[in-house]
Image: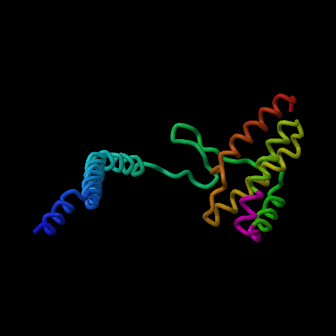
Amino acid sequence: MCMSRMKVSQFLASESGAITVDWVVLTAAVTGFGIASAVAVSGGVDDLAEAISTSLSGATVALLGEMGTGTEAPFEYALLYASDSLYNNWMTSFSTWSDSTLLQMYDVYAAGAENYINSGNLTNAAYYTDLAYAMQQVAGTRGLEVSDGGAALPRLTGLYNDAVAAAGG
């Protein structure tokens, strides 16, 4: 009997299984907090989704070559340098370029046009702006959007016109 009393007392003094109980309680608490957080946030997510849906349902998309909102006159680009013949040649040439080349070169020519405007070289500025416009139009026929969404062209045209006026031309 002494031996079984010793085994019982050893079993009662042992703490080797207590860590399992601790982890079960801790895991249950973390799971409970996770579920409570999801329930608390779900109402706000539903409201946000509804607000986004409402906003997008009334959104409109600007037509290719036009910019602006309903309160402004739409932006209509007029060639600054190129003749219609030269512009049409560019369009034919650009239509053979890959999508990635077309989009990269748009960025290059839009940046170049701004650099030429800032340096006062208005001839090259007009040429590069017309090139960027032609590239944007070809990209649009392919369903592509240039990196700035076409925002550079109205801005470049305004900067160019301001520079021409300042130069007295």
Task: Name which residue lies at 84% across and 59% down.
Answer: 86
Q: 139 above or below 67?
A: below
Give the image quarter of residue 98. bottom right
Report how many numbered discs are placed on residues in the image.
0
Q: 93 above or below 119?
A: below
Quarter of the image with the C terminus is top right
Give the x, y percent position of residue 45.
33, 48
**Is residue 132 on the magenta stretch?**
no
Query: In the depicted view, which residue is nearer to us: 145 or 71?
Result: 145
Judge left or right: residue 97 versus residue 14.
right
**Is residue 100 on the magenta stretch?**
yes
Give the x, y percent position of residue 5.
13, 64
Quarter of the image with the N terminus is bottom left
Q: 164 above or below 130?
A: above
Does the magenta stretch mainly form a helix, a strand or a loop?
helix
Query: In the depicted view, which residue is nearer to us: 167 or 113?
Result: 113
Task: Name which residue lies at 84% across and 50% down.
Answer: 127
The residue at the far front in this view is: 2
Q: Give the residues in magenta.
A: 95-105
Q: How is the image coloured?
A: rainbow
Give the x, y percent position of residue 14.
24, 59
Give the image quarter of residue 161. top right
The residue at the far left in this view is: 1
Give the x, y percent position of residue 28.
25, 55
